[in-house]
């Protein structure tokens, strides 16, 4: 079985790659430079891919309109919300317009070209920042589009952690011995996670609830 993996270098995508390897997939990874504030997560993706000895394509996207997002425009402020506020479901300024749709389309193109059996993605709709392209309904619709819009037709869109809490994701990662020490979740690119952005807070809460020490701290 051959799978194309979206690998950002974060906690979720690292866990998904570990899951795919455990399931016996022959994995091929793709990461994206879409103008984000830093390349720290790209470095993590490279490290994780090396750990699993999987090929990694790095795709550069130059879409000027993505500066609508505070993840891309350095002049915009990254939100610093309380944990409870993050989970309320409102779309934050860190949302990158259509990002997961663009990423998925490229991965599906790759899968169609090499006759891969699956595209494996790491969205999560439980402990997340309210991004619309992380919802299960989006991926159900995408699966239908793949059936009718590709030569292969039967490429599976697999989202292993979409209905898991961060606690459950971390427990799965630990069980699969995923290299979480190589992952990076922070929206900033410093030497250490900021601890203030949505991603840091969601990650920290997950490790706390799982009873596991975060290896990057």
Image: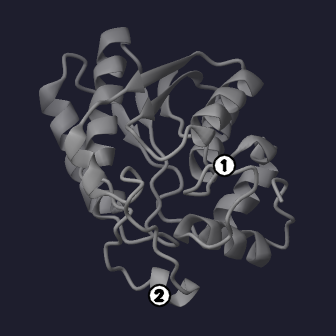
Q: Quadrant of the C terminus?
A: bottom right
- Judged from this view, the residue extending furthest toward the left is 148
Residue 137 position within the rendered picture, expressed as x and y whole percent measured from the top left: 26, 61
How many C-alpha atoms fall within 10 Å of the one at disc 1: few (<14), some, or many (≥20)? many
Q: Nearer the viewer, residue 152 or 87?
A: 87
Task: Give the quadrant of residue 49.
Answer: top right
Task: Inspect this view and state whether residue 23 appears.
Answer: no
Residue 93 position within the rendered picture, expressed as x and y whole percent measured from the top left: 34, 67
- Which residue position is annotated with label 1? 184
Task: Give the quadrant of residue 171.
Answer: bottom right
Colour scheme employed for the rendering of this structure: one colour
Residue that appears at 66% across and 49% down:
184
Q: Is residue 104 above or below residue 79?
A: above
Query: Is 55 positioned to the left or the right of 181 in the image?
Result: left
- Judged from this view, the residue extending furthest toward the front is 75
Q: Say if mark 1 contacts mark 2, CB within 8 Å.
A: no
Residue 159 position within the rendered picture, expressed as x and y whole percent measured from the top left: 45, 48
Task: Give the quadrant of residue 206.
Answer: bottom right
Q: CA distance from mark 1 to mark 2?
A: 22 Å
Query: Is 31 positioned to the left or the right of 19 in the image?
Result: left
- Which residue position is annotated with label 2? 85
Task: Inspect this view and state whether residue 110 appears.
Answer: yes
Tell which circle, 1 or 2, labels the residue nearer the N-terminal end.
2
- Judged from this view, the residue extending furthest toward the top is 114
Residue 25 position within the rendered picture, expressed as x and y whole percent measured from the top left: 59, 25
Residue that appears at 87% across and 65% down:
213
Residue that appears at 49% across and 25% down:
3
Secondary-structure class at tag 1:
loop
Q: Is residue 68 above or below residue 14?
A: below
């Amino acid at each position: 079985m051959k799978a194309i993996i979206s690998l950002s270098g974060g906690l979720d995508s690292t866990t998904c790659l570990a899951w795919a390897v455990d399931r016996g997939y022959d994995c091929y990874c793709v990461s994206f430079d879409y103008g984000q504030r830093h390349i720290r997560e790209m470095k993590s993706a490279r490290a994780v891919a090396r750990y699993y000895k999987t090929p990694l394509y790095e795709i550069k996207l130059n879409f000027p309109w993505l500066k609508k997002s505070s993840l891309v425009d350095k002049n915009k402020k990254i939100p610093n919300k309380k944990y409870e506020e993050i989970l309320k479901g409102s779309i934050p300024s860190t949302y990158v317009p259509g990002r997961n749709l663009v990423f998925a389309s490229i991965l599906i193109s790759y899968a169609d070209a090499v006759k891969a059996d699956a595209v494996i993605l790491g969205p999560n709709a439980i402990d997340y920042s309210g991004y619309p392209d992380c919802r299960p309904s989006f991926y159900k619709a995408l699966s239908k589009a793949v059936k009718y819009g590709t030569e292969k037709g039967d490429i599976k869109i697999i989202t292993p952690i979409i209905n898991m809490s961060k606690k459950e994701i971390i427990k799965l990662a630990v069980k699969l011995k995923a290299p979480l020490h190589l992952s990076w979740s922070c929206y900033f690119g410093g030497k250490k996670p900021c601890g203030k952005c949505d991603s840091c807070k969601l990650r920290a809460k997950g490790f706390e609830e799982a009873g596991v020490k975060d290896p990057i701290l």
